[in-house]
Image: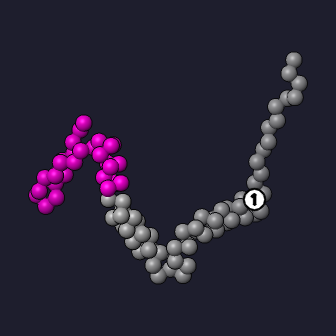
Amino acid sequence: MSRAKILINGAEFKQSAQPGKILSDLVKHRSLLSQLIARDIAGRYRGSLFGSVWAFFNPLLMLLLYTMVFGVFLQARWEVHRAPQNFH
């Protein structure tokens, strides 16, 4: 397997790129991973009006906006092409 060399402040670290090793490290450190994910989500939406609920409602609001613009205002429609029914 290939090994990557990482330099941090002049110190050299060798990292193995084996998928099994990566997966086992994720399972081994799942508590740390879950804490980092929770901190990232909390930090991203801290100070916003709806908090982390905004992550769910934002895509729904964008879908509603696009539906209104293209469906109602621009009258965009899907064309339906039907195949002929008689096969001889």
Pinpoint residue 31: horizontal percent, then vertical percent: 36, 64
Report the residue at 41% width, 74% height from top. 43
Pinpoint residue 71: horizontal percent, then vertical percent: 75, 59
The answer to if 23 sits in the magenta stretch is yes
Say left or right for 84 vs 49. right
Q: How many marks?
A: 1
Report the residue at 72% width, 64% height from top. 68
Q: Is residue 78 among what the camera can see?
A: yes
Pinpoint residue 29: horizontal percent, then vertical percent: 32, 59
The answer to if 67 sits in the magenta stretch is no
Is 49 or 34 nearer to us in this picture? Answer: 34
Pinpoint residue 1: horizontal percent, then vertical percent: 24, 36
Q: Quadrant of residue 3?
A: top left
64 relative to 1, above or below: below
Q: Which residues are magenta?
A: 1-28
Say left or right for 22 vs 82. left
Residue sitting at the far left: 10
Task: Name the colouring of the figure.
Answer: one colour
Report the residue at 33% width, 43% height from top. 19
Tell me which amino acid carries mark 1: Gly
Question: How many neighbours does mark 1 have within 10 angstroms: few (below 14), some (14-19), or many (20 or more)?
Answer: few
Say left or right for 75 vs 51. right
Quarter in which the C terminus is drawn? top right
Label 1 sits on a secondary structure element that is helix
Say left or right for 5 vs 52. left
Is 47 or 79 nearer to us in this picture? Answer: 47
Residue sitting at the far front: 28
Which residue is denoted by mark 1 in the rendering?
71
Q: Is residue 69 among what the camera can see?
A: no
Is 30 or 6 nearer to us in this picture? Answer: 30
Report the residue at 64% width, 68% height from top. 61
